Image: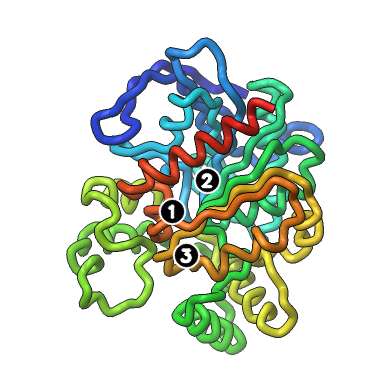
């Protein structure tokens, strides 16, 4: 359902701007249409006569739709300018969906079995029955892998950026953090509350010079130092950082611990592994060689495990957040997305 529509002029990157048709869409899934309310922002070019294909953007853990769209730099606007019909989803418990009353998930499978299928159905109602391309960052990429396995032809392809198929692999700090979290969890319950990442974002924004310096005491930043202009980094930390489910994070670390014993994969979504790996859906897997949250060692297994006849794996010299919003990504990752999506939307 379209709640309202306006025409806007917004930034794409730096001085590049575009005119867009912007719509706020409300998704209500379930058999009777009374399910969890989810919010999507739809963008398409106001200067083109049609669109090349439909794209559904799925943000990562503890973030929201602003992960794809900042006032100074916007991948969603870039894709819209390039002719795509872009839908930017707030998963339940995040962003505008939380304000509408969509509670935090108790398990990440709720994103897969409800949020994404409901969003896909709404996208096809509004934009036509053509298959939809899923583009996911971090946990959003894992959700995309799993959702594609049950989408029954509604998905035209999957693109993931910094999505750790083997969570914590290749990162000693994350592995140690998981051991600590699980050891504490055995002695006391963390409950089902939220991990407030917005406060973390404010600390990073205010202490940017320290966080980006060589003397920063923590091994994990979430971005490559110097990869984003101060204004872009500040906007991301103020707008895109949200709150994440403690239960979901715990389950991901638990799944990673189990993986070291059993070869478990796909984060906390092990029930969807066989379906994803057997799915013959076009696949583009992108990793950042400086990504301290999803190193290439954790990302590449999705590419290697997939039996898709059309699959591509690329590594860029970026970190986790800047894989989308970095100054270099606008000249590398963004054009790759446009070429890849455009070639498959034309089929």
Please give the name of the residue rendered at 52% of the width and 48% of the height, measured from the top-left corner.
59
Tag in front: 1 or 2: 1
**Residue wearing tag 1:** 242
Compared with 146, 250 (above or below) is below
**In which image quadrant can residue 77 be found?**
top left
- Does residue 116 show up? yes
Badge 1: residue crowd in 10 Å (few <14, some 14–19, many ≥20): many
Please give the name of the residue rendered at 76% of the width and 38% of the height, measured from the top-left corner.
30
Badge 2: residue crowd in 10 Å (few <14, some 14–19, many ≥20): some
How far apart are the two marked residues, 1 and 2, measured between alpha carbons?
A: 10 Å
Say the numbered circle drawn on residue 128. Answer: none
Mark closest to the chain's N terminus, 1 or 2: 2
Say the numbered circle drawn on residue 195. Answer: 3
Say the numbered circle drawn on residue 98. Answer: 2
How far apart are the two marked residues, 1 and 3, measured between alpha carbons?
A: 9 Å
Mark closest to the chain's N terminus, 3 or 2: 2
How far apart are the two marked residues, 3 and 2, measured between alpha carbons?
A: 14 Å
């Amino acid at each position: 359902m379209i709640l309202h529509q306006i025409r806007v002029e917004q930034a794409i990157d730096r001085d590049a701007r575009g005119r867009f048709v912007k719509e706020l869409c409300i998704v209500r899934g379930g058999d009777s249409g009374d399910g969890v309310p989810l919010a999507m922002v739809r963008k398409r070019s106001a200067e083109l006569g049609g669109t090349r294909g439909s794209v559904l953007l799925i943000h990562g853990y503890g973030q929201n739709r602003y992960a794809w769209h900042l006032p100074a730099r916007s991948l969603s606007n870039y894709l819209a300018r390039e002719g795509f019909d872009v839908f930017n989803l707030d998963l339940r418990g995040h962003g505008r969906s939380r304000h509408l009353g969509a509670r935090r998930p108790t398990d990440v499978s709720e994103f897969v079995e409800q949020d994404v299928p409901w969003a896909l159905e709404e996208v096809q109602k509004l934009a036509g029955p053509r298959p939809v391309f899923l583009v996911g960052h971090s946990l959003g990429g894992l959700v995309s892998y799993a959702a594609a396995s049950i989408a029954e032809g509604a998905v035209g392809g999957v693109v993931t950026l910094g999505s750790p198929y083997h969570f914590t692999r290749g990162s000693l700090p994350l592995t140690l953090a998981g051991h600590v979290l699980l050891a504490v969890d055995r002695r006391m319950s963390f409950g089902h509350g939220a991990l407030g990442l917005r406060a973390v974002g404010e600390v990073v924004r205010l202490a940017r010079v320290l966080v980006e310096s060589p003397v920063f005491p923590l091994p994990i930043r979430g971005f490559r130092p110097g990869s984003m202009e101060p204004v872009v980094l500040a906007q991301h930390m103020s707008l895109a950082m949200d709150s994440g489910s403690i239960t979901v994070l715990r389950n991901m670390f638990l799944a990673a611990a189990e993986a070291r014993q059993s070869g478990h994969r796909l984060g906390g979504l092990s029930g969807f592994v066989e379906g994803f790996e057997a799915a013959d859906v076009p696949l583009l897997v992108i990793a950042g060689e400086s990504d301290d949250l999803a190193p290439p060692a954790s990302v590449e297994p999705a590419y290697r495990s997939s039996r898709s006849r059309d699959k591509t794996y690329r590594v860029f010299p970026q970190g986790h957040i800047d894989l989308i919003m970095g100054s270099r990504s606008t000249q590398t990752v963004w054009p790759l997305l446009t070429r890849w999506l455009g070639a498959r939307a034309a089929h």
